Amino acid sequence: MVSRRQILLGTAGVAAAAAGGAMLLRGRTSTATPAEAQFEVTKTSEEWRKILTPQQYAVLREHDTEARWTSPLNQEKRKGTYACVGCDLPLFKSETKFESGTGWPSFYAPIEGSIGMQKDYSWGMSRDEVHCKRCGGHLGHVFNDGPKPTGLRYCINGVSLKFIPA
């Protein structure tokens, strides 16, 4: 016969395993993050929170993802430059933006020398995470299903960018 204590301990164990699995899938236990590296622009968490909105902070500093189809930059068609909202580094030119149908602003190439990359093992898969080379802010991911000439799709969180018209 199973005792009440065994049931409670078993339930607690299952809950702990589920929570750990959820954290692994969400990515809070990924490999070294850009925050551990040295960047030209560095700030404390408190300093970042003063200059970023809560959603921008969640994406750039905590590697979160904005909801798809919510960025006004999806509809941006003017010529100009997309810069990091955290440090103003120019990241993408409007000429490289394309409609990917994913719900996030997409580009086939960054401005040379503007981004860094690292492996991201969140959500139970391996992806290439893209971050700002100057401040280390999380931007999004790059995939091999983009248009010519590069064949790449830089899928970028709109809240991590600001548009500067030409």
Image (tube, grey):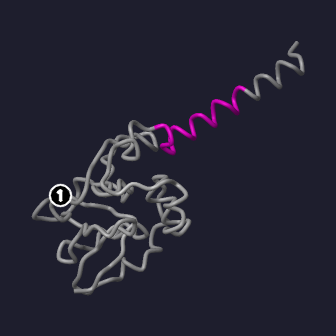
72 inside magenta stretch: no
Q: Which residue is mark 1?
A: 113
Majority secondary structure in the magenta region: helix
Asked where in the image residue 153 lies, by quadrant, the reply is bottom left
Q: Residue furthest top?
A: 1
In the picture shown, does residue 90 fall above or below 133? below
Asked which secondary structure carries label 1, the reply is loop
Report x, y in % for residue 128: 30, 47
Q: In the rendered view, does 19 fall on the left or right side of 121?
A: right
Nearer the observer, 105 or 148: 105
- Magenta-colored stretch includes residue 14: yes
Q: Give the side of residue 60 with respect to residue 79, left or right.
A: right
> x, y percentage for residue 7?
82, 23
Placement of 3 over or under 68, stated as above or below: above
Q: Considering depth in this image, is 139 or 6 the residue closer to the camera?
A: 139
Q: Nearer the viewer, residue 53 or 47?
A: 47
Q: Position of residue 56 (x, y in %)?
A: 48, 65
The residue nearer to you, when weighing 164 against 5, is 164
Quadrant in which the C terminus is drawn:
bottom left
Q: Which residue is depicted at the point 40% across and 40% down?
A: 121
Rendered position, 163 above or below 63: below
Residue at x-position 39% and y-position 56%? 138
Q: Write the residue at 22% across / 77% down.
A: 94
What amino acid type is highlighted by mark number 1? Gly
Magenta segment boundaries in residue numbering? 13-29
In the picture, residue 160 is in which quadrant? Answer: bottom left
